[in-house]
Image (cartoon, rainbow, N blue to C red):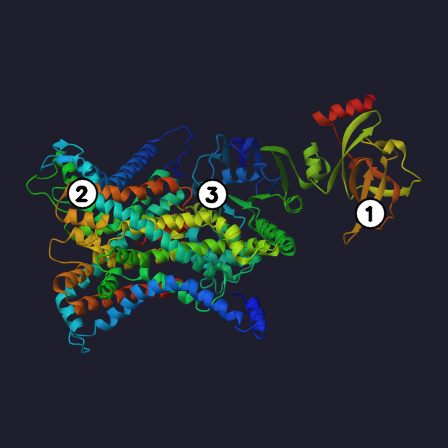
Amino acid sequence: MNNAQTARAAGKARTAKIPSSIWKWLAGAGIAAPAVSIVGIFFVYPFIQSLTESFRTEDGTYTLANYSKAFRLYAGDMWFTLWVSGLSLGLLLLLSVLLGGLLRLKTASLVEFLFKIPLFVPFVVVGHAMRVFLAPHGTLNSALMPLGLYDPDQVPSIAFSTAGLVLALVWKNIGFALLLVLGAFRGVDNSYLEAARNQGAGSFRLIKDILLPMGRGSIGVVAVLTFSSMMGSFSIPAMMGSADGKQMLMVDLYYQIVYQQDYGVANALGVISYLVSMGAAIYYMKKVVKA
Amino acid sequence: MSTETAAVQPAGPGVITGARWRRLLLRMILMAGALFLIMGPLLSLLIWSFAEKWYWPSPWPLEWGTSYWSKVFEGKMMDALISSFLIAIAVTVICLIISIPLSYMLARYRIPGRTILLLLFLLPQAFPQLPVFSNAMVLMYRWDLVGTWTGVILIHLVGSVVFCIWTMVSVFQSIPESMEEASTMLGASKLRSFFTITLPLAVPGVIASSLLVFLYSLDEFTGSLLIGAPFKTTLPVFMYNAAMGYEMQIASVTAILLMLPGIILLLMMQKFMKSEYLSAFGRV
Amino acid sequence: MQIRIEQLTKTYANQRGINQIDLTLPEGGLTAIVGPSGCGKTTLLRTLAGLIKPDSGAIRFGGKDVTYAPPQHRGATMVFQNYALWPHMSVFDNIAYGLKLRRTPAAEIERRVTEVLRRVEIDPADVKKRHPQQYSGGQQQRIALARALVVQPHLLLMDEPLSNLDAKVRQRLRVEIRNIQQSFGITALYVTHDQEEALSMADYVVLMNEGRIEQAGTPKEVYYQPSSYFTAHFLGDSHTLHVRRGSETRRLVVRSCDMAIGSRAEQLPASAAGEWPLVEAVEGGWQLTGEVTNHLFIGSSYRHMVRVGSQAFFADADEACEPGVYRLHLPAERAYWFELEESAAGAGQRLAGA
């Protein structure tokens, strides 16, 4: 409701029985109600619930027991989750900046199209496809077999390892990252690049000295969004598994709910994941938005 | 540009020097690498879906066939397929109905708490979904919504309202207010102006956001697994179960079915999809 | 260093290319390329910069063929229309960038940047902290010049560097750019669509049209001795009249400041009406009769709208003339006569015959 209307409505209200500004307010509230209540009931409330429940034991007393148990059981997995997400993020940023830079400097619509595909492939499908591709007896090894690079009885497995997990996460996120990074790079006026080329900069220099610093904001957005998404990813790590027993935090959380039915520990893990997400967002706000 | 470091000595436009060949070769290798990395996993799915028999260490399936594809049209898989599409349609329709008027309101009026509302709708994509949805599951148990289609639709709506509202707000904001004012000045009511002027102008945005919501719902996994399984199985959950049970062919066929709508959309919509719509979609 | 351009050609689908350009830039001088948009002036500039590869022809920097050399190997730097000062780098880093790419020692960079800043009159005190956005438009212009000059190029290219500034600043910067160019003694090429800018700044003016050079010469030469109708019409505040001279039909290009408003006439003679008014030869020049319809005050003088038959043009005078019929005088050396173009010639012939 714009101010003039509200003022006029308020003026009329002195004579009318029910002020029309109240009607307008009610209409607005009515429009907002369905969407707000769905998100409120099924996201905000459970979110708060997970905060409070993480501090409670089954008998209803408030303790830090869930957290100490979570750290006792999963401290290693927490570091593993951060390590995998961080490594994937680093690779993803490197790849998308290099690729985005090259695509900004020379058009290659086929390559651009190719790298948009992962955007539309669901997480579960990525998990499965990577399993099929990278498993010890998977298609990658099958395809490389005739080259005679290794002994058929002792094939390397990428699928159920940290490398496989990282590869799958990078693969899934490259479409999104490239889209944003390339969008930012395309927003950099040609003259800035030409000025640098005029001074003697080559392609790599153009990317490093001009595109990267000028696209810093969007790259920050990509970093925060993908880091949170990788850290909170569940289906890909659940399907890719891990050979040496380490797991991503979301898989542990699912295990606690479904098999142990220990909601306290699960919620403690959840709250830790929120904190990491928020930490990344705050870091971004401080580092990128201010600069 | 392609001769940045190559042509220190002058070389005519038609002359291909050794450096140029190296450059071309490098480009080809990069292209092949990109093609292999992106298409490799996807082609693996295609090969597996047609493999009747495939034992290690044969580089190719021992027997090809379409018997697993014919299973699409029978039994559980067909059920999952149909219900997934029906859910996606329902979610899209409900989502549009509840978010278009709200987006319009958020785009046009300085209502109190506007920023808070916009941020509220961002939350489901900003935090990990699994811990929140597992608590939502507890709530849905209390209301007997677990294992029902209603429950699944509700949990899909939580995640998809974001796409709808954020795209529609920017679409409405991009339509000049003067368009509506011109209509109201001519005597049309606010409601009439909205339906005859604003909404038709917003159609491309409506189409884009409904496609995003449709795909989100079709691909949604976490919520469907917690709320639906094992009584109501959507296609992604079906695929997950098949893959974890090492039914490689079934899982691959399902995976391709899940991927197709997205790929078709990408092919069709390359021109019409603005990148800001697409970027909203990255976060499933 | 002498810059020679030989038979340079670059074709585009949208005809913004250049066609067999031959040009020699005088050493240490400022050459201005001027022409309407789409005449190929920017293409020529960018080809010299190495940002565009020509289809054929050659560019020689002091005898060395640099036609296909990459931008960094030819020693031509450019000042861009929007300056293209990188906003994420400090002013110092902007200027030092080219030197860093050339692996110049830090102390040397420091010395040369300070030196160039002094010469373009930018205070070198806080350039390491301040970014280009914190400077005024005119200062940014000088920073852009400093960035281009610090690497000691053979050729300085300027792509409409003043078009983003308001009129007052523009006047001042013309002088400043000219002073800096002369103090460095650098060969410079300046592209503009503003004829006044070209005439006032350059040693040598090149007029381009449809990818070709129409005329080249000193500013005075091209202004007072236009060799083609295009040049005459393009330069100055010019108007074209289709007139009869004796029994011939001609195009006459007149500049507002050259036409003097003379004595009043009783009425418009029949010969001055219609589509092809008559121009008579008089002592020292030409005379025609026209009707002053109204005038505008333009500060230094009055600009009169004059109608001759169905055509109209402007004539400036120190005093305002009341509307009415006047005799107008044009000195012989300020009348630029040209043949009619094909289509109009036919019409003229028919009329002359009638």
Question: Residue A199, image x and y in percent?
Answer: 44, 47
Q: Chain of mark 1?
A: C
Q: Is residue B195 above or below residue B130?
A: above
Q: Is residue A236 above or below residue B57?
A: below
- What is the three-letter code of the residue carrying label 1? Asn
Q: Say which mark, if any, is on residue B75.
A: 2
Question: Residue B9, image x and y in percent?
Answer: 40, 34
For the residues bearing labels 3 and 2, Cβ distance under 8 angstroms: no
- What is the three-letter code of the residue carrying label 3? Gly
For the residues bearing labels 3 and 1, Cβ distance under 8 angstroms: no
> Foreground: C13 or B216?
B216
Left or right: where C15 falls relative to B67: right
Numbered disc total: 3
Q: Chain of mark 2?
A: B
Quadrant of residue A252 within the rendered picture: bottom left
* Disc 3/disc 1 C-alpha distance (Å): 55 Å
Label 1: few (<14), some (14–19) or many (≥20) C-alpha neighbours in 10 Å: some
- Circle 3 — which element? loop
Residue matched to label 1 = C294
For the residues bearing labels 2 and 1, Cβ distance under 8 angstroms: no
